[in-house]
């Protein structure tokens, strides 16, 4: 599932491409997006990113709400729209851009047509800049629907503060999240994934932040200390901002990587996420995993100070940490 870094990245690109312009908003051939006509041909004012939600604000006071969920993604393109393929849900296009292909400014090898680089391999480079994008296609979202201003505000009221939307004294001050976490007996691993606590943190950032701050993931919220929670918030903002450029989500420090290389090599981007059964880059202990509240949690039992019981709960009976390692 895309995390907050990718949502903010799409918002920045689509603001550059469409904000202040009239746009065509079209449903896909399956007609599951029935309300496209409410904003079709209207001026798009601004794209808002809040946690894992996108809100395309229109001059008529309506919002196109998109939640990518686990499988949603955009394809961007230049020039005329291409023939629709696959489970296309919606299209946004600059009004009047469908007749003639345009050249990319300052690029002798201008491209036209679609482009979509997978996050697992994307280093942030693009074949064309955001301001030259003529259209996007949307496939596989959890939600693509029209909100009025009241419904959009209700969504904002429900969500916790977003580290990438932090402004001093504003709605996204960390104190709201910290106070809410300190009032809960739920584990910090579950609370960091709760979008009503903090918006935008998903499974990757949850696992990596807890490791980077050497936090036992099973610690109850009310047993956390304010200093550590502030440090996690600050670190989340830095890592997620970097993740807007490098969609791979790189959380390791150069000094901790086996190769000691910059940028991070494939397989060295994360300390614990999806590294179960492998040795920790820092201490050599075996990384563990366990399903917690419907999502897989990854952690290092030594660096994150889990108890013998908590460690044993992630192992099969009679299996040691050493024999658990993936060879």
Image (cartoon, helix red, strand yellow):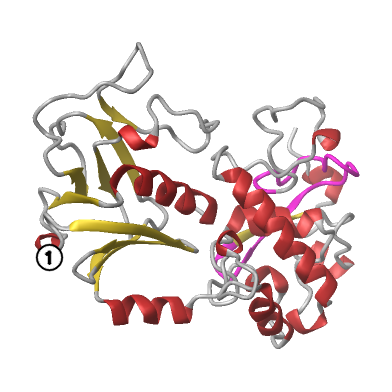
Q: Which residue is mark 1?
A: 38
- Decide which of 286, 315 is in the foreground and name it: 286
- Main secondary structure found in the magenta portion: loop
Q: Quadrant of residue 257?
A: top right
In the rendering, at what x and y percent does residue 92 appear? Answer: 21, 47
- Residue 278 location (% of width, % of height): 76, 40
Q: Where does the C terminus fall, quadrant-wise?
A: top right
Tell me residue 216's x, y (percent): 81, 66
Q: Residue at x 69, y 80 (%)?
A: 181
Q: Circle 1 — which element?
A: helix
Residue 36 falls left or right of residue 67: left
Write the start and end of the magenta stretch as one range.
Answer: 273-295
- Determine the image quadrant of residue 236: bottom right
Picture residue at 78% right of the left edge, 55% below the top: 211
Is the residue marked by circle 1 packed among few (<14), some (14-19), or many (20+) residues within 10 Å? some
Q: Position of residue 261 (x, y in %)?
A: 77, 25
Q: Is residue 101 visible?
A: yes
Residue 175 is covered by the magenta coloring: no
Q: Is residue 144 visible?
A: no
Q: Looking at this view, name the residue that lies furthest to the bottom.
A: 183
Residue at x-position 29% and y-position 59%:
45
Instruction: Residue at 40% x, 43% y: name it.
Output: 13
């Amino acid at each position: 599932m895309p995390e907050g870094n990718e949502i903010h990245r799409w918002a920045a690109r689509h603001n550059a491409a469409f904000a202040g312009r009239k746009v065509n908003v079209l449903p896909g051939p399956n007609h599951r997006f029935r309300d496209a006509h409410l904003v079709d041909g209207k001026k798009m004012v601004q794209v808002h990113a809040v946690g894992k939600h996108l809100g395309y604000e229109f001059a008529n006071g309506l919002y196109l709400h998109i939640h990518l969920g686990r499988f949603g993604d955009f394809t961007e393109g230049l020039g005329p729209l291409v023939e629709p393929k696959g489970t296309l849900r919606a299209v946004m296009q600059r009004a009047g851009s469908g007749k003639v292909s345009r050249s990319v400014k300052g690029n002798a090898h201008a491209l036209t047509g679609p482009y979509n680089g997978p996050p697992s391999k994307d280093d942030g480079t693009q074949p064309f800049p955001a301001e030259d994008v003529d259209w996007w296609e949307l496939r596989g979202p959890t939600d693509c629907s029209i909100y009025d201003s009241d419904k959009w505000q209700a969504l904002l009221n429900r969500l916790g503060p977003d580290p990438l939307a932090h402004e001093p004294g504003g709605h996204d001050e960390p104190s709201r999240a910290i106070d809410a976490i300190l009032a809960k007996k739920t584990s910090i691993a579950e609370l960091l994934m709760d979008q009503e606590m903090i918006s935008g943190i998903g499974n990757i950032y949850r696992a990596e932040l807890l490791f980077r701050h050497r936090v036992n993931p099973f610690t109850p919220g009310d047993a956390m200390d304010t200093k550590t929670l502030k440090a996690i918030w600050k670190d989340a903002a830095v890592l997620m901002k970097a993740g807007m450029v490098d969609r791979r989500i790189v959380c390791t420090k150069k000094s901790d990587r086996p190769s000691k290389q910059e940028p991070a090599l494939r397989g060295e981007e994360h300390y614990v996420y999806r590294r179960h059964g492998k040795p920790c880059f820092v201490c050599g202990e075996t990384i563990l995993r366990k399903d917690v509240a419907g999502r897989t949690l990854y952690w290092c039992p030594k660096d994150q100070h889990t108890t013998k019981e908590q460690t044993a709960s992630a192992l099969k009976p009679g299996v040691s940490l050493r024999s658990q390692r993936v060879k």
